[in-house]
Amino acid sequence: MRYIIREDPSAVGEYAADYIVKRINSHFQKTDRPFVLGLPTGSSPLKTYENLIKAYERGLVSFKNVITFNMDEYVGIPKSHPESYHSFMWKHFFSHIDIDPNNVHILDGESKNLLEECDRYEESIRSCGGVDLFVSGIGSDGHIAFNEPGSSLSSRTRIKTLAYDTILANSRFFDNDIEKVPRMALTVGVATVMDAREVMVLITGHSKALALAKCIEEGMNHMNTVSCIQNHRNALIVSDEDATLELKVKTVRYFKGIEKVQTEIEHIYGLHGSSSSSQIGSPQPK
Amino acid sequence: MPSKTTTQATTWSHQSSQPPHQTRLIKFQNCSALQPDGSLVDNFCLFVDPSTGKIVDGQHAFYAQSIGFTQVVDLGGHLLSPGFIDVQINGAYGIDFSSFDESDETYHLAAKNYLAKLDEFSKKILATGVTSFVPTIITQKASSYRKILPLLSPRSRKGQAHSLGYHAEGPFLSPDKRGAHCVKLIREAPRGIEDIEEVYGKGESGLDMQGAVKILTLAPDVRGVMEAIPELAKRGVIISLGHTNSDLTTALRAKEKGASFITHLFNAMESFRHRDPGVIGLLGDSDEIDFEDESGMTEDSPWNGGGTKSNEGGKLSKKPRPYYGLITDGQHSHPCSVRMAYSCHPEGCVLTSDAMPWMDPEKPDGIYDWRENQRVVKKGYQVTLEGTTTLAGSVVPMDACVRGLSRFASIPLHTAAKCASTHPSRMLGLDKIKGVLQPGADADLVVLDKKTGAVLSTWILGEKAWQRGGDA
């Protein structure tokens, strides 16, 4: 696992967007196959989307041949609801870029048969050849997508009831009325995310510090579902300084120290050593 | 390798079995936009279907119909408003809607010339931000209405402002308040609706023109007019009170019978007197009057405007306050009067230019011929009958009215723009299709400089029809 620390959420967003852009562009240097990108919602990725849009507007990246799969969607509110994840993605990303609507996949919380919808979603991911890069945020309890504490680390796309914590946290988007917050969601499973060829987790703010510390310094645990990235062969965490507050100083120093070395390796071998080196830059520490 | 890639590409998307959509949307971005509720949203995106010229819900089109956008229009951070709708405009650029040249040999030829001028006007007026208008005919010989009105059925041409119908101002006006209207042609309606039908004509080419905006400015104190109002309203005519001596009681009664607009407020009507504020008093009408309240007002009270008593709690069930037209050229109403009217009833404010043929920012001040034996003096935004102080309409472009209202009433530019777009469309009952930036409405748009309020570009059904400093 690699772990990149940046000053604040803006710098995290810049790094993450820059990384995604490089990843997409290096992919298309090797193949015409669409790039398959997994996407999160919530506050963590906002800066990343902003920077991706800027990169698109500057002509540094195109999403024409990118297929996206979102992590989750509420059940019980229409897609047009301002707090639906369909609306979020439209507002913060899709309405600004050149993506083909046919290539966008978001779970349908209005589906008549939710079980079938979940199975269909897994099948769609498979038929696209799997996810190249899954971007994720986490909740303060360490959940990825809506895989709340106690979720099976082998879980697939399914219906989930939301934890009280999550409902409480989300009530700010629903007139501060807990009754209005949806109780259920459709979500990709932990294993669905882990199937991706690469996983990038964005973690910002001191409220996520404990979950981050557990994820990095403790063992894999279904009470902190993000910790399963310890088992992923190609995982990357990007956090701001605030999120490091519960980590040991030693841990922080270690990861800051090896970033430099990693950079040198990427200069020689490209991202993940998977590509010829010369054309591909590497993330520079700011 | 390439062929293999192609095959794969078609199977990767699970929706790719659907036929590809030909339609692609136009996206207007980077603007602050006036919303139907009057708020201003920064970083707004508007999506338009070029095949229909309608505003669409971009999110719904994207997810439900897989329709994306291909064309992006960057509005440079300026103000996006629905196009202006002028419900009282007599002409401009040398064109007079009331003038029908009967020297032409045949009616057919005269009609053709009239429509050619209407089209010319419809192009030129775009420079003032107007995307829809209601040609206004001042008091005419009875025979002229039958010739002109049939030509004013709704007209939309590519790259032109929409002509929505007609506004006939007169001849059923109070002689005392005739303004610049010809005294010899003003008349009463002793036989009520029959007289009115006789003037404007009935059926498709007159009062019953389908799908058209039909506005009549009437004086309810003129014999026979009040009784005819309910019948006119029933036939879809918008009744506007104007050029009238009415006291408040008469005005309230006319409103209850169906009048919903006031023609150029303050002008050609009784002045505001606090014990009988006349037509102007309609702006202060209460939403409900309790018959049993302490004021002792009864159903017979002279101040009761004829509202009908509902069954619930002795409350009056009343028609809402009417919309009112304001010409904010600094001539027709003092800026203080404008601010008073606006403050009193902001939601009813409808900006009108009342522009005359001399309205043309290129035209110099001077004396111009008008009708037989009449000339007018144009000086700045003022036009008077020669040798008098009687205003003969205005020469103010609509965009200047918007800036004027913004200054006079101390309101933001977008709030003033609402009075030239959303309010007139509501007054006309067209607010599902005009005057609002919402899905389903026509993409008739005006882009205003966010600092100066100058018109930068005007769009008809999603196509640029005019832009500052160049051809569209």
Image: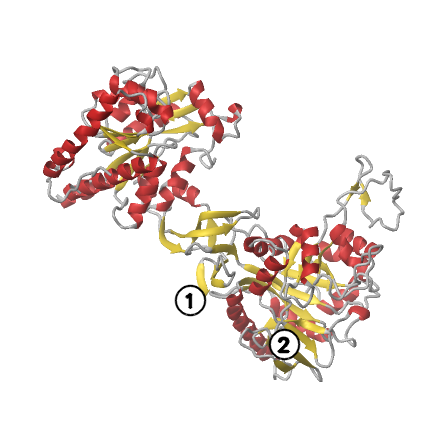
- When the figure is inspected, residue B246 is found, relative to residue A61, above or below; the finding is below
Circle 2 residue: B379
Residue at image position (81%, 68%) is: B188
Q: Say which quarter of the image contains residue B183.
A: bottom right
- When the figure is inspected, residue A33 is found, relative to residue B79, above or below; the finding is above
Q: Say which quarter of the image contains residue B178.
A: bottom right
- When the figure is inspected, residue B29 is found, relative to residue B380, above or below; the finding is above
Which of the image's four quarters has the C terminus of chain A?
Answer: top left
Which of the image's four quarters has the N terminus of chain A?
Answer: top left
Task: Describe the element under mark 1 as helix, strand or loop.
Answer: loop
Determine if marks 1 and 2 fall on one subunit: yes
Image-based side of B306 in relation to B129, left or right: right
Image-based side of B307 in relation to B127, left or right: right
Q: Amino acid at mark 2?
A: Lys
Q: Amino acid at mark 1?
A: Ala
- Mark 2 neighbour class, 10 Å CA radius: few under 14, some 14 to 19, many 20 or more: few
- Mark 1 neighbour class, 10 Å CA radius: few under 14, some 14 to 19, many 20 or more: few
The image position of residue B89, as x and y in percent, is 62, 67
Residue at image position (64%, 62%) is: B209
Q: Numbered disc 1: what chain?
A: B
Image-based side of A28 in relation to A209, left or right: left
Residue A272 versus residue A162: which sits nearer the camera?
A272
Circle 1 residue: B472
Residue A46 versus residue A262: which sits nearer the camera?
A262
Whether label 1 touches label 2, CB < 8 Å:
no
> Mark 1 or 2, which is nearer the eye?
2
Task: Describe the element under mark 2 as helix, strand or loop.
Answer: strand
The image position of residue B103, as x and y in percent, is 63, 84
Earlier-in-chain disc, 1 versus 2 = 2
Q: Is residue A278 visible?
A: yes
